[in-house]
Amino acid sequence: MKSIVIIGAGIIGCALAKELASEGTDVHVVEKNHSFGEGVTSRNSGVIHAGLYYPPQSLKSLLCQEGRELLYHWCVQKSVPYKKTGKLVVATQLEDEPWIEDLYRNALQSGVKENHLIPLVQQEVQKMSPHIQGVSALYSLESGIVDVSSLCHSFYVEAIKKSAQFHFDCEVREITDQEGYILHTTRGEMGCDIVMNAAGLYADEVAKLAGIQKYTIYPWRGDYFKIKLPYRVDPLVYPVRKPQASGLGIHLTMNMQGDTFLGPDSEPASSKEDFHAKSEKKLKFFEATERYLSGISPEMLTYETCGIRPKLRSFSDKEEKDFVISEDLPSFFNLIGIESPGITASLAIAQFVKNKM
């Protein structure tokens, strides 16, 4: 029987455990936190992405497309709360319109079905919502939201049912190769045949424990504000992404309870633990949002939280980096830079890794 240790019990680690646990494997998940889903997974907007932005044939693009279909099916099957909200990507001025056209072309080249994308002129945007301001927009029918905590819990429960074992408060300090791998943890030694490094923000540091020096994760911070709108907006609303931007712009999202949020923005973090509140960003968030939403005021915004993305894109890079899913040593698999659309792609990532094995 093959023994597998998965390092990290976030959404990816739990999806891997669910996928890999079977009668023929002995799967253990080690996690330094007190429970599953407490790292990057816990600070996420829960958007189900349609796959508009990623370069065609990239892992982000392919696994987002495949993962979205798997995710919607899983949510129905396991009663995980989700909603297919749709998403408006808005050009707020005439100069933005070529970027909307580029986005439309990229989405089609990436495999988004033409009948799932609707270009809108200004009057059509206003008809969809009189409060959304834009000279044109692209409407994505397949975008949505999911309760990330419930989704991660559903993966965890399924993994447990398949006899995967989870070890919490268990941090890996050293990894040695002795006819298989020995993980030296804060709860003792653990031997295995296969290692899956799904440690999120710390995946580069875990790789280095095994002597793999080629990865560096750059922590990019994104803040969120809650906004109490005086009206209802049904779809997610995004400004069009500017070329080379490190994020998708400050956008409007919502949760399953109907609360609405702005963010995240994107900036280099001072550390991987840089979670202190930045309520002083309120005016910046308001000014960015009033470009595409009318009838709002700064008083409607209250600081909510922040998240940190585990990017492979350095703070000086001009372009985004793809996911890395690589067997860098025999039976040692690194999953590095698994940021957005990681949640959307989670089930497809797990299947992809299983096929690589």
Image: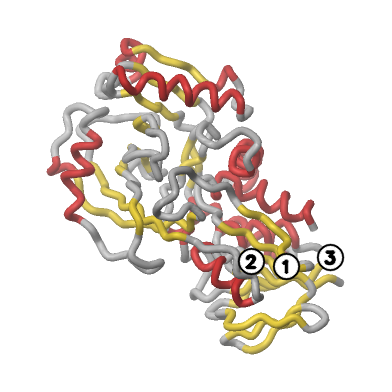
Q: Is residue 170 left or right of residue 89?
A: right
Specify the amino acid type for callout 3. Answer: Glu
Residue contact between numbered discs 3 and 2, judged by CB atoms under 8 Å = no
Which residue is pictured at 64% across the width and 89% down the height? 188
Kindly state the secondary structure of the residue where label 2 is placed: strand
Q: Quadrant of residue 231?
A: top left
The C terminus appears in which quarter of the rendering?
bottom right
Question: Are the residues flagged by discs 3 and 1 in contact, CB closer than 8 Å?
Answer: no
In this view, the mark in front (3 or 1): 1
> Which residue type does callout 2 highlight?
Asn
Left or right, 336 with reference to 26: left
Q: Which residue is mark 3?
A: 23
Instruction: Mark 3 or mark 1: name the one nearer the start of the chain.
Output: 3
Q: Dot 1: within a 10 Å radius of its alpha carbon, few (fewer than 14), some, or many (20 or more) residues?
A: many
Q: Which mark is residue 332?
A: 1
Image spot of residue 238 (x, y percent): 37, 33
Of labels 1 and 2, earlier in sequence is 2
Contact between labelled residues 2 and 1, with CB atoms less than 8 Å apart: yes
